Image (cartoon, grey):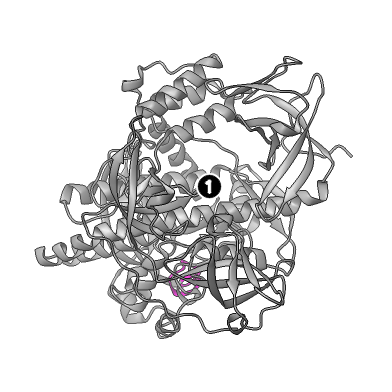
Amino acid sequence: MGKKNKDKEPESAPSNQPTGIFEQNQRGFGFIKPDNGGEGVYVSEYDINGAFHGDRVGYVISHSDYDGRVRAEICKICEPEDKLIVGVFHRRKRNSYVKPLDSRLGSEIRILAKYQNKAIDLQLVVASVKRPADLYWMDGRIVEILGFMDEPGVRVLGMIRASGAPYEFPRSVLNEAKRIQTSVPPEDALARERVERQIITIDGEDTKDVDDAVSLTRYENGVYTLGVHIADVNHYVKENTELDREALRRGTSVYLADRVIPMLPPELSNGICSLNEGVDRLALSCIMEIGADGAVISHEMAETVINVGKHMTYPKADALLNGDDVPEYSEYAPLLKLMEELCLILKQKRELRGAISFDLEESKAELDENGMAIDIRLRERGVASEIIEEFMLICNETVAAEYSEKNLPFVYRVHEEPELDKLRKLNDFAGALGYRMKAKTRQVKSKDIQELINSVKGKPEEGVITKIALRSLKRAKYYYKNQGHYGLAAEFYCHFTSPIRRYPDLQIHRVIKEDLRGLTAKRAAEISAKMPNVCGMSSLMERRAETLERDVLQLKKCEYMQQYLGQEFEGIISGVTNWGIFVELPNTVEGLIRLHDLTEPFEYNAERMSLLGLRTGRLYTLGGVVKVAVARIDMEQRQIMFGLRRSENVSRPQSRPKPRR
């Protein structure tokens, strides 16, 4: 293994200059996704100025095209001088090279013999290229050897490296983590209020980093006291320490199909910070008095010490709520029933005010001991997960409302109103299928979108219209000013409940604790100055994590479907373009039928998102049911290609796809 290059510190763009992530097309031009959200900005191949695909850049608006499209020129690259590119090493007698996995990063990187680092032909490696570079002729050096592509975990490791997500923790961070005590000292516990109630946690079966615990009582007058107790990570991760700087750099934990990349070292994330059963843990608690109508009457924030009585899993908690015998949880059955009662009240209140609920099916990959996919299963969602979701939502709203009213520096989770053009397209598309939103486009509220979704429940068009509705909305982001949350129909919202795995939550805890102890105006100004960077970095790292999680799951879907090459399935048309038809199987595996693989020409209707066969008159529209065969799988591009199988009277697909053997 070669030593990793010590890069120069990346340059920062001037504070008044817009920044964003540059995404390049294989034909040379690209778009910049602004850090502050909004539509991508076009960049011609002549205005890239040495930037690579995936770089964070500063840019200036150069001019607008005659059609009104805004153009930009990249004027600053906010990245280290060395660009790290993941690819396959090809050893040759002359001109050995690395072929990048992502073709947008060039076709070949020449590696001279002295820079090959003993790499073997066809190994996956990380190559370093000096900026600025010519995509058509690059010299580099191998700085890391990942292994052969067919070795367990190597493909995923390559994807992690390519994404830029930090994997290993720096030695200084690990040393700092090791110096933290592994249990709560008595003096720390005595300095806080101890919560003397039944407290439980409910999480997934594999969860090790437990952020949140809950308690609940109900009085004779019908008022509930809901306690949401969140791990006091800030007690251990102090501002401006190595742990804090690394947590900000990562922004979030990344949950991949075969591994977790934590925001904090395991000593904290799975240890002293995790609200494990039967041990004292420090917490920051939000204790809410909630009326029988679901309204928060009052609340209190407090630094507490808690001891979780029972750590539950979602499947077993659901079984208990369904009346099954779960002996290890029997003591907590009345508490769970009470929680279900309040959950339904809160959910109904949220739905009545117009919050959008997207019931999209999610999947997970089941892996063998080598990390290879052996099944793709739908994630089951029961009442237990709804209980935790509703309790966290009301807590996040309550905390955000308090600190907006106090006008203290804060990190809000904001979701802006959708663009009128996208709402118009949603309404036109729904109208073509016989549905329409009641309100005029300019007056559409979240409630109108939810009513549209409700109107297609259980119908063939449900999945399609729900997906189009989701795409019509803007992406939620972190911001230092409250702007409300459109999707939740909430005036105030933040992320308070997951400080082990999200940096904004950790930053919020810092503000709350200092407020509880007396926040001075000078200190508030210091915190306020940091908030734009915290919000921008956190939003950026969240997008990176989501992309990596999605791409790794897609890789596992490709692995799983290799065993079904040539076999037939029934699926639903999930996308129609002028180059092909996307078909989704009931387990969420999606594949593409390319038009040039079909036997007749088609006419594409962009408004109706449909294709009409010009010889047969066959019409393919979103939501239609078709038979397909698995034709080809491209592991490098993580693509599944289907072939269309003509069949009459195709029935609706079942909950799990079964190949026709």
Q: Tell me the quarter of the picture where residue 175 sits.
A: bottom left
Name the foreground residue: 7 vs 44. Answer: 44
Rendered residue at 33%/69% (across/down): 234
Q: Tell me the quarter of the picture where residue 510 sits.
A: bottom left
Q: Quadrant of the C terminus?
A: top right
Q: Tell whether position 273 is magenta.
A: yes
The residue beneath circle 1 is: 27
Give percent across and percent down for residue 88: 66, 67
Give percent across and percent down for residue 50: 41, 61
Rendered residue at 56%/37% (across/down): 360
Q: Quadrant of the N terminus?
A: bottom right
Name the foreground residue: 393 vs 580. Answer: 580
**In the displayed structure image, the side of residue 409 where residue 229 appears, left or right:** right
Up the image or down, 338 lies above or below 49; here it is: above
Name the foreground residue: 168 vs 67. Answer: 67
Amino acid marked by disc 1: Arg
Q: Tell me the quarter of the picture where residue 11 sits.
A: bottom left
Rendered residue at 76%/29% (across/down): 598
Name the foreground residue: 193 vs 262. Answer: 262
Question: Dot 1: within a 10 Å radius of its alpha carbon, few (fewer than 14), some, or many (20 or more) residues?
Answer: few
In the rendered structure, which segment of residues is drawn in magenta? 269-279
Q: Is residue 277 visible?
A: no
